[in-house]
């Protein structure tokens, strides 16, 4: 069923011609239902700071509209872009509103008119149609004629042109530099080469990790005991949802054009606000407990602040016998009921991103105000939402590549932190000067307080520092292409592993 025009949630810009399907013979009688008028001026649009030049030429589509109407024109364009379904044009006209169809007709025209350049970049044109249709179904569309070439930019991003163009830019890095950076992923030595870590001291590893992880548990649990006789204040998830959608847009702007270039990614699916839940809802089974141990153990293992128990015990992350010994230590620690109870409680008070369902789990309540001030807590929650959002938009090939290196947390958490710290610095600058942003982030009427310095720095210990080293050496743009678009060599990941 076609939706009625009046119920369309898409705002029409004033310059938007009204596209309707009308029998040809009524066109001249009813001026209001005139056929769509597409721009007749041909122009080349150069997307800023890229090598992309978009030829905008709607003349052929205009002629087509006069001859075969909307359904016929869509059918023709989709077929030219590799779609075989002979009913597609008619189905689209039945399903979508005139405003949606106007967007789609122009977007298809852009890809059709520039098909040669796209094929050169290796773009599969039938994939483009699928992406554009996904965009139309999502129905958050920038209308043609929007200031700043907003429509053209959107089409270049969501159809996959930008992605192909970015991945085709040469990586100007010496092979020797890449090889050296690659060794960061193998701190004990590259596979098949001389190993630089001596024999493991299992007992030292056990005692060191027990001490470090107990410290982490006690430190991180302390904010979750309420003041005597009181309860902790619950977090308002309606407010978090507003912050989430603001952050999604802010992150895409600060890191433009990289996150939105991933045309098949989650940014073209449900909004961030639709994927939030409370960390209290995370079911904690044995796998989850062990997962926490591996994550936190790796986090503290090389950190001098926790006496770097893995370094001290000669733990080699790529040596199977060491991994087995570590697994036994974690299982043994968890066999202590009190230790396992603490880990369970902390998991339910730790923000996390679940790759399986795409959900982000946020803290259910504010910490004890005697342990952390409200304003610092708001900055921390904001930082967390940025960090978890980075997990959400990490390219799946990066997550998969982490399985093939010895120090996977550089890929999983280090780069997340590089981008999180950058975004938070920009957000802090903006909130300092913009009351609206400040009220949103810190809570209405809260006096200005900058984010604590520690939050503006790359976290996750050595894994964060290693990722920052790679970003400094290869450039943020390259690392962003690697991280958001899955071009792994730009993260100093070598083939074959
Ligand atoms: Zn994380």
Image: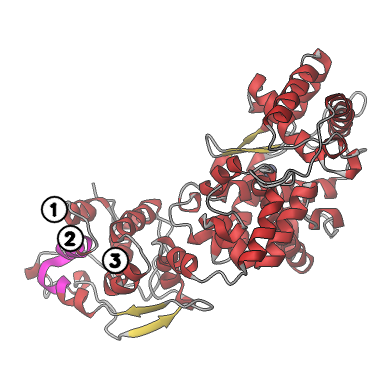
Instruction: Please name whichever residue, 50 or 90, is drawn nearer the observer in this view of the structure.
Output: 50
Which residue is painted at 61% across and 69% down in the image?
A: 173
Residue 207 coordinates in the image, percent (x, y): 89, 25
Indicate which quadrant contains ligand 1: top right
Instruction: Find numbered disc 1 in the image and state the secondary structure of the residue it sits on.
Output: loop
- Would residue 31 be visible to someone looking at this image? yes
Give me the C-alpha separation between circle 3 and circle 2. Answer: 10 Å
Check contact, mark 1 vs mark 2: CB within 8 A. yes
Give me the C-alpha separation between circle 1 and circle 2. Answer: 7 Å
Which residue is painted at 78% across and 40% down in the image?
A: 299
Give me the C-alpha separation between circle 1 and circle 3. Answer: 16 Å
Residue matched to label 3: 108
Instruction: Find numbered disc 2 in the image and state the secondary structure of the residue it sits on.
Output: helix
Quadrant housing residue 54:
bottom left
Sequence-wise, the earlier of marks 3 and 2 is 2
Image side of residue 304 versus residue 270, left or right: right
Sort mark 1 into few (<14), some (14-19) or many (20+) by Cα contacts within 10 Å. Answer: few
Residue 96 coordinates in the image, percent (x, y): 28, 54
As for residue 71 lying within the magenta part, the answer is: yes
Residue 75 marker: 2
Residue matched to label 1: 86
Which residue is painted at 49% across and 49% down in the image?
A: 266
Residue 449 coordinates in the image, percent (x, y): 86, 58
Image side of residue 38 versus residue 424, left or right: left
Instruction: Find numbered disc 3 in the image and state the secondary structure of the residue it sits on.
Output: helix
Q: Is mark 3 within 8 Å of ligand 1?
A: no
Query: On screen, 181 above or below 413?
Result: below
Residue 359 coordinates in the image, percent (x, y): 57, 38
Start-end of magenta stretch? 64-78
Instruction: Please name whichever residue, 416 or 211, is drawn nearer the observer in this view of the structure.
Output: 211
Instruction: Please name whichever residue, 274 or 76, is drawn nearer the observer in this view of the structure.
Output: 76
Check contact, mark 3 vs mark 2: CB within 8 A. no
């Amino acid at each position: 069923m076609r939706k009625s025009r009046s119920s369309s949630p898409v705002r029409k810009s004033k310059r938007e011609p009204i596209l309707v399907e009308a029998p040809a013979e009524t066109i001249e009688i009813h001026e209001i239902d005139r056929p769509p008028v597409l721009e007749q001026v041909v122009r080349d649009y150069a997307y800023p700071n890229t090598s992309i030049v978009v030829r905008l030429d709607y003349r052929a589509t205009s002629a087509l509209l006069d001859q075969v109407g909307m359904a016929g024109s869509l059918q023709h364009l989709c077929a030219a872009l590799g779609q075989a379904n002979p009913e597609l044009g008619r189905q689209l006209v039945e399903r979508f509103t005139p405003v949606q169809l106007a967007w789609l007709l122009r977007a298809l025209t852009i890809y059709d008119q520039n098909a040669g350049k796209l094929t050169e970049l290796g773009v599969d044109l039938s994939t483009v149609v699928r992406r554009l249709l996904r965009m139309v179904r999502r129905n958050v569309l920038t209308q043609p004629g929007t200031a700043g070439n907003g429509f053209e930019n959107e089409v270049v991003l969501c159809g996959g042109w930008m992605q192909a163009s970015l991945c085709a830019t040469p990586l100007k890095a010496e092979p020797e530099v890449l090889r050296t950076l690659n060794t960061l992923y193998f701190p004990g030595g590259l596979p098949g080469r001389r190993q630089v870590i001596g024999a493991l001291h299992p007992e030292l590893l056990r005692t060191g990790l027990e001490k470090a992880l107990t410290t982490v548990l006690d430190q991180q649990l302390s904010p979750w005991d309420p003041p005597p006789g009181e309860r902790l204040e619950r977090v308002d998830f309606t407010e978090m949802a507003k912050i989430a959608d603001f952050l999604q847009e802010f992150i895409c702007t600060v890191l433009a054009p990289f996150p939105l270039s991933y045309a098949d990614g989650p940014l073209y699916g449900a909004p961030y606000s639709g994927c939030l839940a409370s960390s209290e809802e995370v079911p904690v089974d044995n796998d989850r407990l062990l997962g926490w141990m591996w994550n936190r153990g790796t986090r503290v293992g090389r950190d001098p602040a926790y006496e770097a128990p893995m370094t001290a015990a000669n733990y080699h992350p790529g040596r199977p016998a060491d991994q087995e010994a570590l697994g036994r230590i974690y299982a043994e620690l968890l066999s202590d009921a009190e230790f396992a109870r603490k880990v369970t409680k902390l998991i339910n008070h730790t923000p996390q991103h679940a790759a399986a369902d795409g959900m982000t789990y946020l803290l259910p309540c504010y910490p004890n105000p005697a342990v952390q001030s409200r304003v610092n807590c708001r900055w921390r929650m904001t930082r967390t939402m940025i960090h978890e959002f980075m997990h959400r938009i990490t390219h799946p090939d990066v997550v998969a590549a982490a399985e093939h290196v010895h120090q996977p947390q550089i890929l999983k958490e280090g780069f997340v932190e590089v981008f999180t710290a950058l975004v938070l610095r920009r957000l802090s600058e903006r909130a300092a000067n913009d009351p609206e942003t400040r009220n949103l982030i810190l809570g209405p009427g809260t006096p200005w307080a900058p984010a604590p310095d520690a939050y503006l720095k790359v976290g996750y210990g050595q894994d964060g520092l290693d990722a920052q080293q790679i970003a400094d050496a290869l450039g943020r743009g390259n690392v962003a292409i690697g991280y958001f678009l899955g071009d792994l060599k730009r993260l100093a990941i070598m083939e074959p592993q």
